[in-house]
Image (tube, helix red, strand yellow):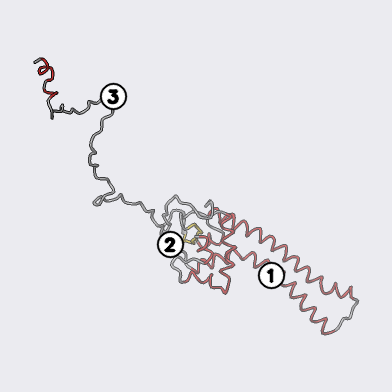
Amino acid sequence: MSSNHEDGPSAQPGYSPPAYPPQPSYGAQQHHPAQPCPPSRGMVGYAPPPVWVPPVPVYPYARWGRRVGGYLIDFTPAYVAMIPFWIGYVLLYVRIIQVTAEGPTESPAGLFGELLRPALVWMMIGIMLMLIAFGWHWYNRWLIAGRTGQSMGKRVLRTKLVAEVNGQPIGAVNAFLRDLLHILDGIAGIGYLWPLWDAKRQTFADMIMKTVVIDHPSQGGPGQPMPPSTGTYPYGRTA
């Protein structure tokens, strides 16, 4: 009988003890089911913030006649300086034709002096005046116009050369490059005539350098453009 009491229920055939889940140890990390994420701002139905676009400056573009007038005023010293040079050149050419037709009547040394002396005097005067005109051109068209936007011709005709992106002067180096690019305008003269039908009244040099010539009646007077004060000129400093 003692054996029956000692066996108990666990000793009966077909009986298994109940299984209990393991208890987490102290400090162990517990896992939770994933929760749904809140809707993101990029989902359908959310309007993105507006993108700021800088305003495009609107300028009172200078008329073609005023541009031509200012150009002629700026180049008048160079044209005047070339007159003595061409006088000497014509004198030399005419005298050579006369001597060739009549035949030499003097010694070669005397003939050489007769031909060259008057012509050389005029040509040397012309060369000296052209050097002075070039110095004035450098000061007027590149240094002053680059820093202020106005050469003498532009001040007389009340126009101004500015960068299209910010309405500021383009600097001496860019003013020189712009004058150099006028070579393209001089091809068949089409570039100088382009402002007659262009919306911004630009020459080819203006398009490449991104410059415009505008009316500039007076400092702060009516007709002054109001472009943004900030901007980057693509060819370097603007002042």
Q: Amino acid at mark 2?
A: Pro
Mark sitting earlier along the chain (2/3): 3
Question: Is residue 202 found left or right of 30 in the rendered image?
Answer: right
Residue underneath mark 2: 60
Quadrant of the rendered image containing residue 102: bottom right
* Vertical relation: 190 (above or below) 219: below
Q: Residue furthest bottom?
A: 101
* Closer to the eye: label 2 or 3: 3
Marks 1 and 2 sit apart, C-alpha to C-alpha, by 37 Å
Residue underneath mark 3: 27
Q: Amino acid at mark 1?
A: Ile
Marks 2 and 3 sit apart, C-alpha to C-alpha, by 78 Å
Q: Amino acid at mark 3?
A: Gly
* Vertical relation: 153 (above or below) 148: below
Estimate how packed mark 3 is, as few (under 14), some (14 to 19) or many (20 or more) residues with alpha carbons within 10 Å. few
Q: Which mark is residue 5?
A: none
- Percent coordinates x, y for residue 235 in the rendering: 53, 55
Callout 1–callout 2 Cβ contact below 8 Å: no
